[in-house]
């Protein structure tokens, strides 16, 4: 019997045109193996609702075409269901797809889906929400918020924003597990995958299948050291910096003073300033 796959396309993700996707899918998907349909998201949160419906209908695979925000919406809706997630990386950063080692060439990703290789990966609960890749508090949350307000997406917009916002940034502090206070921080990330996107690593050795995540605490550095940190991030050596503390765990509590956060690059305002983090091991089936 053929398997069913539903393509959910975020038309505003990244910078490339998404209207070529139906043609690519028609051309490269193995129609002897799959029946398929295609829907476009119309608003924020739509990929989550569409993915939930797909799982309820017993669709075998939801393939999300988008960046990490869309992957979060689709993937978290599929946790605990029998539907697997595939990713067509059409976002600005594509951190989760890159972590999984997926090709960024859409033709290749579709051909890879034909091979039906699945893997179970961890997700992380963040109070009443779920994360799949990197989430956090502080500078990265501010950038996620500003990027969301920005009219242009894509890599260059990210870089311009990061350099502009760093100049006036005020440090944050966090309390970990009600005992250790970390002050004067640039940010505190929760890394279930290794990078923010575009090859900017925050926790290069993070493994999505070990039942744990990394808390990455980054002190606010002077400007030149910040440039150095960005370069170390690209080189995959950022975790060795004297400004970075890395804690591997399966569960933690973080207390913050400001409820601005990001989950998989999407800005969120958390209801609570005390955040419970818990790894949900092997909770999501993905096509790799
Ligand atoms: N039709 C739509 N109109 C407006 N926003 C949408 C629409 N469909 C989805 N969205 C929202 O677009 C936002 C950005 O999507 P996504 O994260 O996939 O792309 P990106 O930000 O370009 O990539 P990345 O997260 O990899 O940097 C998400 O918050 C998603 O909910």
Image (cartoon, rainbow, N blue to C red):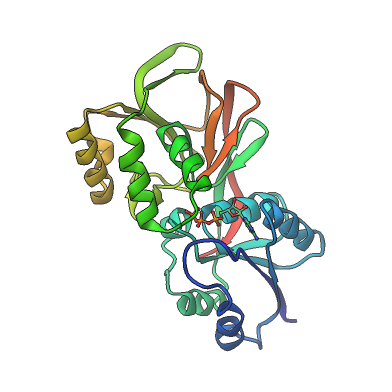
Q: Which image quadrant for residue 56?
A: bottom right
> Residue 241: image x %, image y %?
22, 34
Left or right: where 84 falls relative to 28: right
Q: Which image quadrant for residue 143?
A: top left
> Residue 180: image x %, image y %?
41, 14
**Residue 49 visible (yes or no):** yes
172 relative to 225, above or below: above
Q: What is the residue that sits farthest to the front in this orientation?
A: 151
155 relative to 253, above or below: below
Residue plotted at (48% across, 49% down): 150
> Residue 186: image x %, image y %?
35, 28
> Residue 16: image x %, image y %?
48, 70
| Quadrant of the displayed image that contains ligand 1 | bottom right
Give the camera-side residue of 184 and 255.
184
Give the camera-side residue of 272 and 17.
17
Residue plotted at (44% across, 66% down): 102
Give the camera-side residue of 278 and 170.
170
Left or right: where 217 falls relative to 82: left
Callout count: 0
Q: Which image quadrant for residue 214?
A: top left
Q: What is the residue that sits farthest to the right in this orientation?
A: 57
Residue plotted at (33% across, 54% down): 199
């Amino acid at each position: 019997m053929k398997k069913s796959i539903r393509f959910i396309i975020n038309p505003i993700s990244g910078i490339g045109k998404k209207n070529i996707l139906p043609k690519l899918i028609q051309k490269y998907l193995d129609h002897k193996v799959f029946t398929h349909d295609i829907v476009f998201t119309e608003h924020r949160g739509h990929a989550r609702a569409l993915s939930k419906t797909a799982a309820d209908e017993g669709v075998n695979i939801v393939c999300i075409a988008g960046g990490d925000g869309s992957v979060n919406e689709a993937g978290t809706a599929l946790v605990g269901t029998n539907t697997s997630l595939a990713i067509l990386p059409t976002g600005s950063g594509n951190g989760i797809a890159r972590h999984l080692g997926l090709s960024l060439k859409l033709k290749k990703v579709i051909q890879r889906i034909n091979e039906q290789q699945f893997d179970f990966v961890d997700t992380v609960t963040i109070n009443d929400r779920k994360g799949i890749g990197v989430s956090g508090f502080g500078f990265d949350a501010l950038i996620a918020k500003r990027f969301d307000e920005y009219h242009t997406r894509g890599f260059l917009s990210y870089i311009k924003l990061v350099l502009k916002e760093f100049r006036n940034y005020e440090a944050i502090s966090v309390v970990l597990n009600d005992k250790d206070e970390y002050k004067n921080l640039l940010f505190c990330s929760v890394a279930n995958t290794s990078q923010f996107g575009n090859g900017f690593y925050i926790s290069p050795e993070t493994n999505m299948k070990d039942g744990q995540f990394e808390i990455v605490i980054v002190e606010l550095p002077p400007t030149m050291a910040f440039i150095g940190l960005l370069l170390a991030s690209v080189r995959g050596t950022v975790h060795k910096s004297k400004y970075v503390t890395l804690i591997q765990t399966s569960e933690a509590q973080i207390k913050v003073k400001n409820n601005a956060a990001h989950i998989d690059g999407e800005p969120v305002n958390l209801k609570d300033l005390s955040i419970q983090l818990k790894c949900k091991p092997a909770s999501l089936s993905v096509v790799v």
